[in-house]
Amino acid sequence: MKGKHDKFKSPTRRQVIGGIGMGTATALLGMPLVARAQSEPIRIGFPTPLTGPFGAEARDQVKSAELAVKQFNDAGGLGGRKAELLVRDDKLNAGEAATRTLELIEKDKVHAVVGALSSAVQLAVNQVTRARSTLYISISQSDTINEVKDWSRYTFHEALNPHMTTAAVAKHTFKKGMKIAYLAADYAYGHEMLRGFKRAQAAIGAASVGEILHPLGAPDYSTFLPRISAMKPDILCICNFGRDQANSIKQAVEFGMKQQMKIVVPVLLHNQRLAVGPEVFEGVVGGANYYWGLEETIPSAKAFNNAFRAANNGAIPTDYGAYGYTGVKSLLQAITAAGGTETDKVVAALEGLKYDVAKGPQSYRKCDHQSIQSVLVLESKKKADMKSDVDLFRVVATEQSGEAMLRTCAELGFPA
């Protein structure tokens, strides 16, 4: 039964479209979606191991990433469109990282992912992002992520990689005829650093006298150290990360190994040096992506340090912490250049990006999206030479950025 007011009912959606013409209707119906896309926040997923043996480095990465987002928003964002950082704890576990990344993409609708602080974990994140055509900028060392079997056009690697890091460190510590022993963590990071050092060792003419693998998070190295001492090496390369680095070096020093051999690491970590003091680390040499002391010669480092100090009660940014800044900053620069968050446009912008946000010139190589950048070689200072509590290292050398530091695209599996 019809009501008495039925003849005054509002027109249906189909009637509106029929009355105004299909082209005009399509434009009108699409306007709310376009408006939302232009005004919605730029959402950046950030998985990182806030809990576990890499927690100190992870928390520093979050602070630096937050600074990059704050600077972008304070400058007006992208035509008023602001950015959001969605931090998730991956617990240094590949399965957890994959789950959190999937949630970030499907539930939180992130436009891109930056993060992961482990060679193995970043590969798990990358598997999820590439399967869903989501842009991912990794900020932890890995050689594998740039190889064709793991790479995708959505995969970018802002961190140094083990090949370039170990080559730089070996160049300034290994000599022809030297005997090298290795203590390495038994997972991707340790394996790749070991491979890189052995490749550099062969080119220099040094010789390996043995290698020992230890489990991730090992609290006790006492069973390994006598075996290493018996090898009588000139150099002991300790290839591990986070608290493992502090624990293994401390125990090696207590065992008297520093009097017998030089201790070298692929990455000399600010936080781990602070954790055990200058006496333990004195004379240890290793590589780094960043050191706050660059502010004396590099304007972008000074600007980054000053902004970080202002945001963090006078604290200085750390090495791995800086990756959070450079990774997010390069992404936001590319989004700005692309004029939005459309993935293909941002990928193209990243491929053409020339950026200097903290340490001098950087760019992404087109074939594998590896960030071309300088590698620092640092030596830990003795206490008497420190001018302040954060004056930890001396810069032994700076290997300048360039493709010569990288494996060739063909070696990685890309067509010539």
Image (cartoon, rainbow, N blue to C red):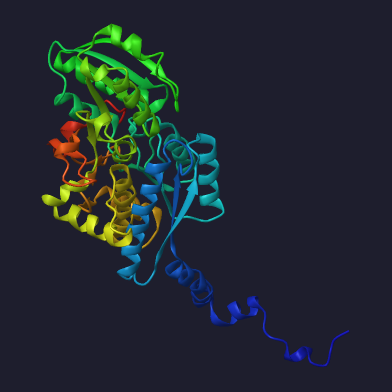
Residue in front for this viewpoint, 214 or 196: 214
Whether residue 348 is visible to the viewer of this picture, yes or no, is yes
Task: From this view, report whether residue 392 is shown above or below residue 354.
Answer: above
Rendering coords of residue 331 (x, y %): 33, 53
Residue occupying image coordinates x 40% and y 35%: 118
Q: Position of residue 280 (x, y in %)?
A: 27, 29
Farthest-out residue, front: 384
Q: Nearer the viewer, residue 142 or 251?
A: 251
Compared with residue 20, is residue 101 higher up or lower down, i.e. above or below?
above
* The image quarter in which residue 261 lies: top left
**Residue 402 shows in the view:** no
Q: How far across and down, in percent of the image, does residue 312 sit? A: 33, 58
Residue 213 location in percent, x, y? 39, 17
Eyeballing the image, is 19 above or below 40? below
Residue at coordinates 31% horizontally, 27% vertically from top-left?
413
In terms of depth relative to the viewer, which is nearer, 337 or 265?
A: 265
Q: Quadrant of the image for the N terminus? A: bottom right
Residue at 19 percent across and 37 percent down: it is 383
Residue 360 horizontal side relative to residue 6, left or right: left
Quadrant assignment for the C terminus: top left
Is 397 placed left or right of 235 in the picture? left
Q: Nearer the viewer, residue 348 or 48?
A: 48
Count of numbered circles on the image: 0
In the current view of this chain or complex, which residue is farthest to the right?
A: 1
**Does 412 sit above or below residue 50?**
above
